[in-house]
Amino acid sequence: MGDTNIEIPAFDLTVLHDYGRLKLQAAEQELRPQFGESKPFRI
């Protein structure tokens, strides 16, 4: 166990970022009716 440095390709990071954003959007659509339009979620 030498390197603690794990390199993640930029492609994987992009996919993870897109996936996270999609999950956030889905959560936002579920939560919006509870909070109303006065508090929009933005990234």
Image (cartoon, rainbow, N blue to C red):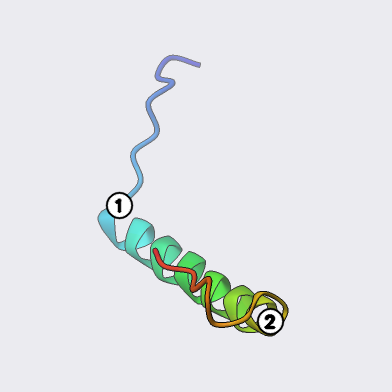
Of residues 3 and 15, the one drawn nearer to the viewer in this rendering:
15
- Name the foreground residue: 34 vs 9: 34
Residue position marked by numbered label 1 in the rendering:
9
Residue 35 x %, y %:
66, 74
- Seen in the picture, residue 30 relative to 13 is either above or below; the reply is below
Identify the amino acid type marked 1.
Answer: Pro
In x, y percent, where is residue 8? 35, 46
Q: Residue at x 51, y 16 (%)?
A: 1
Q: Nearer the viewer, residue 7 or 18?
A: 18
In the orientation shown, which residue stands out farthest toward the right?
Answer: 34
Q: Residue 18: name its quadrant.
A: bottom left
Q: Are marks 1 and 2 in contact (CB under 8 Å)?
A: no
Q: Please tell me whether mark 1 sits on a helix, a strand or a loop.
A: loop
Which quarter of the picture shows residue 3? top left
Quarter the C terminus occupies: bottom left
Q: Classify mark 2: residues with Cα within 10 Å, few (<14), some (14-19) or many (20+).
A: few
The kind of secondary structure element at disc 2 is: helix
Residue carrying label 2: 30
Query: Dot 1: within a 10 Å radius of its alpha carbon, few (fewer than 14), some, or many (20 or more) residues?
Result: few
Residue at screen point 37% across, 59% down? 12
Quarter of the image holding residue 42? bottom left
